[in-house]
Image (tube, grey):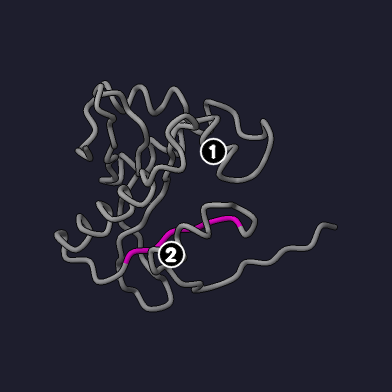
Amino acid sequence: MIRNATYKDVQFILSKAKDVANEATLLEDTISQEQAVKMALFTIEQNGYYLVCENVNKEIAGWILLGKNIDYMTNQTHAFIYELYVLPKYRNVGIAKQLLQAAITDSKLYGFKEIRLNVFANNFAKEIYNRIGFQDLQTIMYKKL
């Protein structure tokens, strides 16, 4: 079941912030717990919110952090997925897809015409996003100096 996160749910989610951020960025132990929590709280303070997916025992299996963002080229606002995470023991059973579908539904209800997210090029989640219908919009490139 997918529902809005409670205060207690958010505390649980934030306790996992470091692991979530490091996994999403494909970095090992680079982002501190404090930094990861600060990033999540900033989004929440800007009217972001979590949806959680719970299992039959009412335990959190995964979550998604939604908010809005602005495209500074077009000045248009859009829904934005800041975080999507499924706890390891609940992976590969469709929870990410359910959370993405819930995010799309919520975003439509709020009147958004588009939803976006960022994903690192080598992140396995990119395949899930493509299957749901997300398309590449831009590419950020870098060169180490």
| Residue 116 counted in the magenta span | yes
Residue in view at x 55 percent, y 44 percent: 24
Residues marked 1 and 2 touching at CB (< 8 Å): no
Circle on res. 131: 2
Residue in view at x 42 percent, y 33 percent: 90
- The residues colored magenta run 115-120
Q: Which residue is at the front of the view, 139 or 61? A: 61
- Give x and y (percent) for residue 33: 54, 26
Amino acid at dot 1: Ala
Residue in view at x 30 percent, y 69 percent: 114
- Give x and y (percent) for residue 112: 22, 66
Q: Earlier in the sequence, mark 1 or mark 2?
A: 1
Q: Is residue 74 above or below residue 9?
A: below
Left or right relative to 84: residue 103: left
Left or right relative to 138: residue 75: left
Between marks 1 and 2 in the image, the one whose residue lies nearer the viewer: 2
Which quadrant, please, contains the C terminus? bottom right
Amino acid at dot 2: Arg
Q: Which residue is at the front of the view, 66 or 136? A: 136
Secondary structure found at label 2: helix
Toward the bottom, the furthest residue is: 74
From the image, tell me which residue sits under label 1.
21
